Amino acid sequence: MGKEIVAMILAGGRGTRLEALTAKVAKPAVYFGGKYRIIDFPLSNCANSGIDVVGVLTQYESVLLGTYVGAGSKWGLDGNKSLAAILPARERGEVGATWYAGTADAIYQNISFLDQYDPEYVLILSGDHIYKMDYADMLAAHKAKGADLTVAVLNVSLEEASRFGIMNTNKDLSIYEFEEKPAKPKSTLASMGIYIFTYKELRKYLIEDAKKEDSKHDFGMNIIPMMLNDKKKLYAYEFAGYWKDVGTVESLWQANMDLLDDKELDLYNIKKDWKIYTEDTLSKPQIIGEEASVKNSLITQGCIVNGDVKGSVLFNNVYIGEGAKVVDSVLMPGVLVEEGAEIYKAIVDEGVVIKSKKVVNKEAKKVELVSDNAR
Amino acid sequence: MAKVVGLVNLHSDVSYKGLTERRPVASVSFLGRYGIIDFVLSNMSNSNIDTVGVLIKEKPRSLFKHLGSGNSWNFNSKSGGVSLLYNEKYANNTMYNHDINNIVENSAFIEKAKSDYVVIAPAHIITTMNYAEVVDAHARSGAEITMVYQRINNANETFVGSDYLRLKGKEVAEIKQNKGNRKERNISLETYVINTKVLMSLLKYAKKVSSFFDLKDTLAYLCDERKIMAYEYKGFARCIDSYEAYYKASLEFLDLDVSTQVFKSTWPIFTNTNDTPPTKYKKNANVKKSFVANGAVIDGDVEGSILARNVIIGKNAVVKNCIILNGSVVGNDAHLENVIIDKDARIEKKKVLISEGEPLYVKEGDVV
């Protein structure tokens, strides 16, 4: 029996703008929010939306991401009828070894995977965004409109609009034009890179696109214009909650800081029971020492804090020595801050040791990235 | 390699007042994110025992939920697994509801496992014991039964009511109850390695002597006629045998010299995941010398306390020397000292609860 909907997460990106943070891991595997990896968000959203077959398309540094996703047990996707499947670019019988040439090509190369499940709809997601979203609501909208493609959009400010792919729509939210990073935007509805396709249509367009040698094989640049040209039914679906593309060191830092503000992304399920699932680390509860002070911060298990922490996010097994000061910073797993060291407005990469009395980024004008990896 | 089966023995007379009203000692929350049973299960897992039976005495609901399929402790190999051994026949009959009757009732578990040795250990004595080392010593000694003990010098304060061993060389000469009248004792940690065949014959033997005999009674009765080896364990051990001992042992972990003896990178303590977010410290948070589990949201003063998952401490509340279990809420400006708050309770704002002696207890789900 076919599945109503299958999700495909594009997780092959290199994320060069994250500098040293992606020197050894794919962008979707980058740490976020004191406990998570970025890809936990789309995977948890799928699990919470009742989507139980999820393909994860990998290319750059696919090994760590592959072992992390595994069969999907962390998100409850490892049942008899559910699955998280890692789909790396690979050698295939008919065509030999190929890389994924673009977002559309990545899905095209996995048509046989999709065919196995014979889905009515396919949800295409990107593995590098932070948000909570019920895809079931979006699917209901897609069905209600009888759409061939529904694109989730976020209403951004006019200044920001030139940084995004913009959907120009009619009053009923039907899309008549797509513009990538327009200099003079006609609309402020930015594509979130979340698509629901009716699979029959998607399959047809992917095969057609694959034949075109001059195509970039990209959903935004090629598939959507082709469908618009053919007068297919494309609709925008407006999303109102928190959404962040954490593509740069600065935006990754900002998204972490957003968690400290109650108005932003709610990890504590106060409004809706919508947990973000992740790996469980085998560490003890966090220990706050006698001389410590912790304010306006997120701290996770395994941490030992003996110094001052303010406005910061600490991942598991971070150690803060006595008299150390950590302000407005993100400390990834296993960071060791020795006695008397000071860190301001920084992202400190996994396992870095900040030596005793060392001062990092005292000026605190820009976000500083401290890493043992080079990029 | 010898095959070893682990038995977690929950048949004991230990209880923690209100905390064990509706759950067994084994699943009482400990240090914010563990159940008491996690320590013995982790020791078995870390000792490469992958076939474990849990001898359940009573109130199993929360324990079933906690253990699940045993994946969290790595008991999910194809050859091993965790089995919940329950003796329904005698569940409501205190005199007959003991470990020997439970093993007899569930002897199919032991027979099917086809092990050479059985390791039996309780949940309420917290250790980081490597059972593989005990089994090795047992095998080398050629004994059929080995008992693990610890030499302590505060037997007048702790392990009172437990058994102690009188030794003759490396053998157990006599087993007696610790009445707390002397400081130095070789205290039994109620942990045994027994050849599987010998264990099965002991069960029959015990029934002949007295139907009320449990394993402890049987070994005490036997020790002058059978060779029982004594094995000295020198690592961390705490006997959590009462409400007071639970409170004391919990807060003792706030001392890093104590907690680092148990939490070692080479000896992980496993438990099941709850997918809780990191703990949020808000602007008015002032936390000192405390253990905090994930998912808590803190906006008040917390000192010398243990907060479990998803606890909420309201603005300017004061929490001192308290243990607060999962999901409980302390209202704004409340003041708590020496209180144990069970799960999902709510302390109204401005409420003052201070105990001078034994810690106060607030029941699961209560509103105070």
Image (spheres, coloured by chain):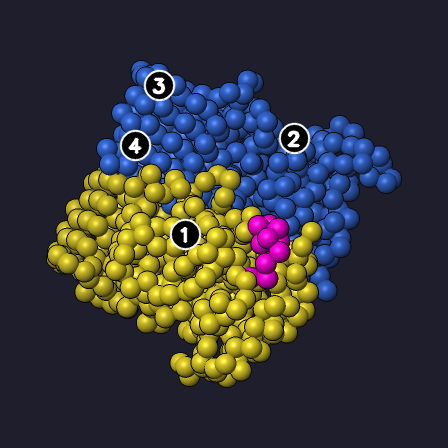
Chain colours: A blue, B yellow
Q: Which region is colored magenta?
A: B136-145
**Sequence-wise, which precedes: disc 3 or disc 4?**
4
- Near-viewer residue (B179 or A85): B179
- Near-viewer residue (B31 or A249): B31
Give me the disc on residue A60.
2
Give me the disc on residue B342.
none
- Residue at 58% of width from left, 24% of height from top? A23
Mark 3 highlights which residue? A356
Horizontal and vertical percent position of residue A295? 26, 36
Mark 4 highlights which residue? A306
Disc 1 is placed on an element classified as strand
Mark 1 highlights which residue? B150
From the viewer's perspective, is the residue at label 3 or at label 2 nearer? 3
- Residue at 47% of width from left, 82% of height from top? B210
From the viewer's perspective, is the residue at label 3 or at label 1 nearer? 1
Q: Hey, what amino acid is under mark 4?
A: Asn
- Residue at 29% of width from left, 64% of height from top? B179
Disc 3 is placed on an element classified as loop
* A309 lies left or right of B270: left
Dot 4 crowding, Cα within 10 Å, few <14, some 14–19, many 20+: many
- Residue at 28% of width from left, 68% of height from top? B17
Pick the quarter of the image with the C terminus of chain B: bottom left
